[in-house]
Image (cartoon, grey):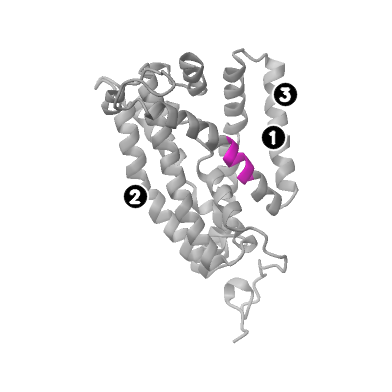
Amino acid sequence: SNEKTPLMGGKDDKPSLSHSNQRTVGTMSLIAIMYFTVSGGIEGTETMIQTGGPLPTFIGILLMAIVLAVPTAMMTAELSCAFPENGGFVLWARAAFGDAAAGMMGLLQFILTAVDSALYPGLFAAYLAQALRTELSYLTLWTVQGVFIAAVAGLNLAGVANVGHGSLMMMMFLLLPSLLITMAALTGAFTGTGITGWAFDASRWGDSLPEEKGWKDWSKFIVVLMWNMGFWERSSLITGEVQQVSTVFPKALGATVCIVVAGYVLPLMAFVGLDGDYAAYDNGYFIEIVYRVA
């Protein structure tokens, strides 16, 4: 039958959100886009080590993967296959609860995205300053953040296909150094010294912070943990751009869950083994550790 569903604009005469553009996002590009909607690397995870310690961080990541990441990813894959159009969770809310709920869903997500996106220019500037071993002036700080925003905006304006390719390149750029450092450090897990000569203490993996840490610290730990393990449903917004949705979407989500979890746990194990000064773990501290041991 060629009759359209209410979601796509049928008997109820609701406007359609479907389009005739060619679907250009393949599996690898979708994995990269999903990776950045959820994670984007270990940058920003230092706070969990600082406020909770290594063992609670590892347990928290694995627990959130089981109770949040995997179920949300499975839901996203199923509903994206059922509604293969741009709009994602806005369309799901519309189909289930009507236009008012869909509009509220879209508005709340817009506000959340605006607040969340405001974090990344500052995070980028913090890591850049740490990499350059300098303190950025007020003018330089705002210039760096402005260039970062302009670059991201320009990539988005270039189209979703370019976003996919750009995200894939950036994902490789972020993961490769982390992978090399992790592999080099973890070779010392059993001997105490890695192949690079770095001193390594695997016993720190079981450390927790003292019990006198207050609720303020644990609330920050939980918020940062959820921030680093959430937002799986965001990738559904570009479902209408994905090739062979029923095949590509579930496969990409499964791969991304594995990449995100491993991309947090293994590098954190490496850095904790290299440096046990948990109070010093703050944005940019991973670079400081590399400088210190290299």
Q: Amino acid at mark 1?
A: Ile
Q: Give the residue displayed 39% in from the left and 53% down from the top.
A: 70
At mark 2, the secondary structure is helix
Q: Is residue 84 above or below residue 279?
A: below
Mark positioned earlier in the residue sequence (2 or 1) = 2
Distance from disc 3 to disc 2, alpha carbons, whole Å, reads 40 Å
Please state the horizontal and vertical placement of residue 115, each as a whole percent of the image: 57, 37
Q: Which mark is residue 45?
A: none
Q: Give the residue displayed 47% in from the left and 52% down from the top.
A: 255
Q: Is residue 246 above or below residue 160?
A: below
Q: Which residue is mark 2?
A: 67
**Left or right, 261 with reference to 2:** left
Distance from disc 2 to disc 1, alpha carbons, whole Å, reads 33 Å
> Dots 2 and 1: beta carbons under 8 Å?
no
Q: Which residue is mark 1?
A: 149
**Left or right, 95 with reference to 21:** left
Q: Which mark is residue 143?
A: 3
Question: Image quadrant for the N terminus?
Answer: bottom right
At mark 3, the secondary structure is helix
Q: Is residue 125 magenta?
A: no
Residue 184 placement: quadrant: top left
Magenta span:
167-173
